[in-house]
Image (tube, rainbow, N blue to C red):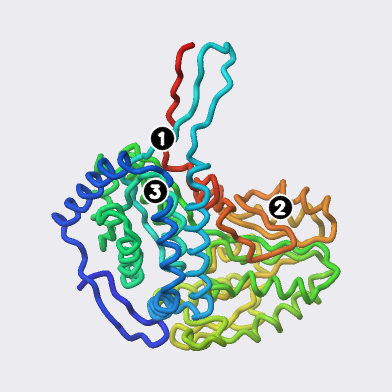
Amino acid sequence: MSDYAVVNPATGETVKTYPTIGDDELKDAIGRADAAQRAWAPSTTVEERAALVRRVGELHVEQRERLAEIIVREMGKPVEQALAEVDFCGDIYGFYADNAPRLLADEPIDLLDGDGSAFIRRSPYGVVLGIMPWNFPYYQVARFAGPNLAIGNTVLLKHAPQCPESAEAIEQIYREAGFPADAYINIYATNEQIETVIADPRVRGVSLTGSERAGAAVAEIAGRNLKKVVLELGGSDPFILLSTDDLDAAVENAVAARVDNTGQSCNAAKRFIVVDELYEPFLEKFTEAITAVKPGDPSSPETEIGPLSSSTATERLDDQVRRAVQGGAKLVAGGDRDGNFFSTTVLTDIGPENDARYEEFFGPVASVYRVGSEEEAVALANDTPYGLGSYVMTTDPDQALRVADRIEAGMVFVNLVGADGAELPFGGVKRSGFGRELGRYGIDEFVNKKLIRVGG
């Protein structure tokens, strides 16, 4: 039986299965992507490719209801959030359509000796492989494929095994937008087959968004084969509350930062670090507010959190909560499951010896910590193997920048949540990976920054 299947996490029903690609068919796909890149990129301008990217974004928005319905049944995303994800893809493709000519323009270099001229020309890498996760099935592809196709790279896309229908829909949109058939190829490949893809000399780079374990495996194979890699991995982002003029607003931000996508976001706030004087009132209000968010039917516009993405994800989260409590954590609220629906959960008293202090909870589970000072807050925020995003809440602007500067993370958001944008670079440090997506840095990963020097 194929690994690729739509299994509705709300009902457990297997809706449809898809056949895994054969080895010969996979070799052919690599060859076709390589041939397409060599023929297509030199014969088109950045402006022409950007126009196709723009059409991809427009088609996402035009087909937003159909696309949203697919991921509601694939991974249980609440429908209003699914629609918002599709709309965000429109913004991402639009950003690269608008800005690719400028971002890929020749970059002159001031020569020290003044003899002649020199510049950097950004040219395509070749075929690039994208390995994408299930939690944002369209958005993750948009931020990888959009800029790379504008560059003139061609794309092989391996999506998550539980997202074959959305993967198929994205490929259809690229065809409908006018891209050559082999510029974007969806492959239903196994992990073993992906090893051969990464090793193939025609594939020049690989980008993975996923788990730390998957990132380490891909980086190892890519390293053996000297391939450029971008890794967007897990996170255990701190939400640091140091002062506030409006505790209710701070609580509202905290809840929003935790429950988006049913808590299944790598850059969601997961550890809430609160100074002494605010800890008790924050914990009380936060617990009341987050437990008021109840799991519901993801197809209903009223639903804020749906089921977890799969039975495997639910069992993993349930095990984590149980082990956290066994290790000494206090279960303040929640911790219950009904099928793949998991109640919003609050944990406190997680000591340094508890594994839960260093794990990523991928679901609606919040850990709340008490600290005595700014210094202690920063130390606790950094006491994690991850370094993706972070949130700092304070009424002191000097403190905000001071803390932001000391946090070991790829992104810091001060006094706001949910502020990602197509123009803002996304990525982390430490075990959250390396490289950047989105914005100008996202288009600069898989390009040959070729020096051209001309004599005077």
Report the residue at 49% width, 80% height from top: 79
Disc 2, SS = helix
> Disc 1 or 3, which lies upstream in sequence?
3
Q: Position of residue 109 (x, y in %)?
A: 55, 24
- Is the residue under label 3 in contact with that under label 2 (CB below 8 Å)? no
Query: Tag 1: Cα neighbours inside 10 Å, few (<14), some, or many (≥20)?
Result: some
Report the residue at 26% width, 69% height from top: 3
In the rendered structure, the answer to whether residue 134 lies left or right of residue 296 reads left
In the foreground, 437 or 7: 437
Q: Position of residue 166 (x, y in %)?
A: 36, 70
Residue at which label 2 appears? 379
Query: Tag 3: Cα neighbours inside 10 Å, few (<14), some, or many (≥20)?
Result: few
Disc 3, SS = helix
Residue at which label 3 appears? 48
Tell me the mark number nearer the camera, choosing from 1 and 2: 1
Tell me the mark number nearer the camera, choosing from 2 and 3: 3
Mark 1 residue type:
Asn
Mark 2 residue type:
Ala
Q: Which mark is residue 448?
A: 1
Query: Tag 2: Cα neighbours inside 10 Å, few (<14), some, or many (≥20)?
Result: some
In the rendered structure, the answer to whether residue 425 lies left or right of residue 395 reads left
How far is mark 1 from mark 2, CA to CA? 39 Å
In the rendered structure, the answer to whether residue 98 lies left or right of residue 210 reads right
In the foreground, 290 or 143: 143
In the foreground, 93 or 261: 93
> Disc 1 or 2, which lies upstream in sequence?
2
The picture quadrant where one finds residue 125 is top left
